[in-house]
Amino acid sequence: MKKQTVTIRDIAKKAEVSVATVSRYLNESGYVEDEKRKRIAAIIEELDYRPNRLAQGLKSKATKNIVLIVPDIQNPFYSTMAVTAQQQMMKKGYTVTLFNTSGDHKMEMESIRTVQNIGADGIIFAAVSMNPDIEEALKKTSLPVVAVNISEVGCFDTVYGDAGTSTYLTTKYMIEMGHKKIAFAGSVIGNANTRNRKNGYISAMKEAGLQIREEYIFEMGQILNSDAGIKSGYYFSALQDKPTAICCSNDLIALGVYRAFYQLGIAIPDQMSVTGVDDIMYADLCSPRLTTITNDSEAYARVAIEALLDHLQGNYQGEVREYEIDRKLVIRDSVRELRDA
């Protein structure tokens, strides 16, 4: 037998409230007394009511769907962000559509165009940079947008960590451990986020009066992943005057360096020290455990969701806001002290 469809009229009748009250409860669009809220919630659970989001969207022009755009879903930083966003939005009755762009500008633009085609209420745009084309495309959607992990954004609410602080802290720590020949892996030409991380490394070196050598800075492609780390590991190992330590702009690059050095028979940290950024789960599981910087992607997602919901629910219509996620040095086992350096 076909299961009879439950409507909000059925819920209203059984809960002894008006249809309008049930509608306000479901859409979070107005005040509902606590006693009535509890009664409605109990009836919804009892009748196993599931609202028809498509029908709701046709009536209200709201789809109850938000889009999350990320550059690299294989990076635990972004996959954790996606899981947290989905969990938080489901509690509010929203679905999350995920787009992975591989850090490619064309794919980012295509994702934004697709958002307009499928219909969505808002966008969380997570990337490593924001160029004028992307910014303009996001504006044209006329949707609420929250930018994540991107600094230097002036037109949307932004959730970010001070990228320069991260590599400044790891480089400074290696200097305190006696290292002077420190290399940097993880700069992408024209990318604001990685430029900040490169500048953090440079600032710490200059502050200590140490030489910044051009051959000690490894530039790479669009995605800062383990493959790029492997390439940088082979590059630094081939230098005649090798560095004693490598400051990596994220943990995946550092793990790629680990892989390259394992293949080359270079011991970490005895022969070369390595640091990362992000403190992904693998940082504490690899051997030796990786010294890195906290970068809580769950916190990014929670703050971004709260900011977006402020706009979706009409609770905030003021100036753009900036939220900075705090970062701390996590000292583990991948940096060796050089007493005679």
Image (cartoon, rainbow, N blue to C red):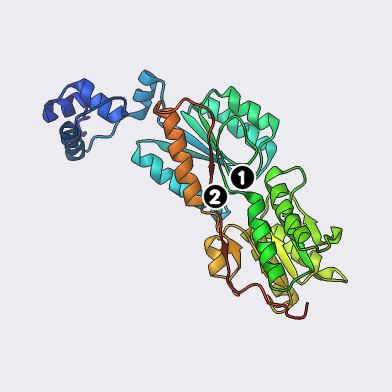
Residue drawn 48% across the image and 38% down it: 97
Above or below residue 118? Residue 89 is below
Which residue is labeled 1 in the image? 71
Above or below residue 190? Residue 173 is below
Q: Position of residue 192 (x, y in %)?
A: 70, 43
Q: Is label 1 in a helix, a strand or a loop?
A: loop
Q: Is label 2 in a helix, a strand or a loop?
A: helix
Q: CA distance from mark 1 to mark 2?
A: 8 Å
Horizontal side, residue 58 vs residue 51: left or right: right
Q: Are marks 1 and 2 in contact (CB under 8 Å)?
A: yes
Q: Which mark is residue 63?
A: none
| In front of the other: 211 or 6 | 211
| In front of the other: 199 or 259 | 199
Tell me which numbered mark, 1 or 2, is placed earlier along the sequence: 1
Above or below residue 257? Residue 127 is above
Q: Amino acid at mark 2?
A: Tyr
Horizontal side, residue 200 vs residue 23: left or right: right
Q: Quadrant of residue 215?
A: bottom right
Residue drawn 69% across the image and 59% down it: 227
Residue drawn 73% across the image and 51% down it: 199
The answer to whether residue 259 is seen in the rendering is no
Which residue is labeled 2 in the image? 78
| In front of the other: 317 or 110 | 317
Above or below residue 6? Residue 297 is below
The answer to whether residue 279 is seen in the rendering is yes
Categorize mark 1 by other alpha carbons within 10 Å: few (<14), some (14-19), many (20+). many
Q: Position of residue 245 (x, y in %)?
A: 73, 69
